[in-house]
Amino acid sequence: AQVDFAPITKLNDATLILAAHQSVPAKNLAELVEYSKKQGGLGFGSSGAATTTHLAGELLAIRSGAQLRHVPYKGGGQAVTDVAGGQIPLIYTVVPTIAGFLKDGRLKAIGVSSAKRSTVLPDVPTFAESGLAGFEVSSWYGLLAPAKTPRPIIDRIQREVNAVLQMPEIREKYVRGGFEPVGN
């Protein structure tokens, strides 16, 4: 339960992305919505039921009118492999999971659900830019401690982690990997 943990720091934000197998003819969100309707629905893989990526895909379907069916996986790795192999047409995941697949052309990006474009994939439009005003869903990673951890320990860990996240070489690795370091 939430009361069992004490927050330490938010490590980073991770941009969420919807990507497609190369056989999907859609190049953008509007074309994907039309194609999904013509096909009677398209499956999208995620890292599992009730995950941020699953719920983001469901919200995208509701807001855009796309006909999407969730295909839950036990993690993002198998989902990405199945989309790259053509077993399912779409994946909703975090950018770091598929950046390499996009760069080598095995998958194509439809859009990102962040407020601004990804620093790793600056040519991929946001869903807001594609006509879904206010559509913003992101993922983040953070550190928590047991609820009864003394405040001085939590404060020290936060300061130390924040100092590491400010190091240029660490920031560069985060950004190159598709994450935005936070350290708040």
Image (cartoon, helix red, strand yellow):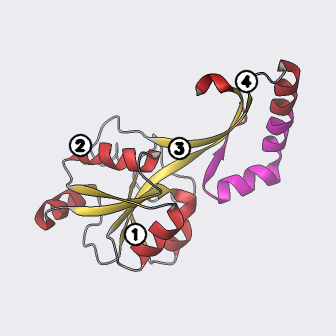
Q: Nearer the viewer, mark 2 or mark 1?
A: 2
Residue that carries the numbered disc 3 in the rendered image = 139
Amino acid type at image mark 1: Lys
Residue that carries the numbered disc 1 in the rendered image = 108
Residue that carries the numbered disc 2 in the rendered image = 62
Q: Nearer the viewer, mark 3 or mark 1?
A: 3
| Start-end of magenta stretch | 160-184
Whole-percent x, y for residue 47 in the image: 47, 57
* Vertical comparison of 99 with 122: above or below: below
Q: Is residue 126 visible?
A: no
Whole-percent x, y for residue 109 in the image: 40, 64
Q: Nearer the viewer, mark 1 or mark 4?
A: 4
Which residue is rendered at x = 21% and y = 53% of the image? 66
Which residue is rendered at x = 40% and y = 69% of the image? 108
Q: Which numbered circle lies on residue 147? A: 4
Q: Could you tell me how far apart the alpha carbons at marks 3 and 4 are, in whole angstroms?
A: 23 Å
Pointer 3 with pointer 4, Cβ within 8 A: no
Pointer 1 with pointer 4, Cβ within 8 A: no
Which mark is first along the chain, 3 or 2? 2
Which mark is first along the chain, 4 or 1? 1
Q: Report the quarter where the N terminus lies.
A: top right
Residues 166 and 12: in front is 12
Which mark is first along the chain, 1 or 3? 1
Residues 81 and 168: in front is 81
Q: Report the quarter where the C terminus lies.
A: top right
Q: Please tell me whether the stretch drawn in magenta is mainly helix, strand or loop.
A: helix
State yes or no: residue 161 in magenta.
yes
* Vertical comparison of 9 with 140: above or below: above
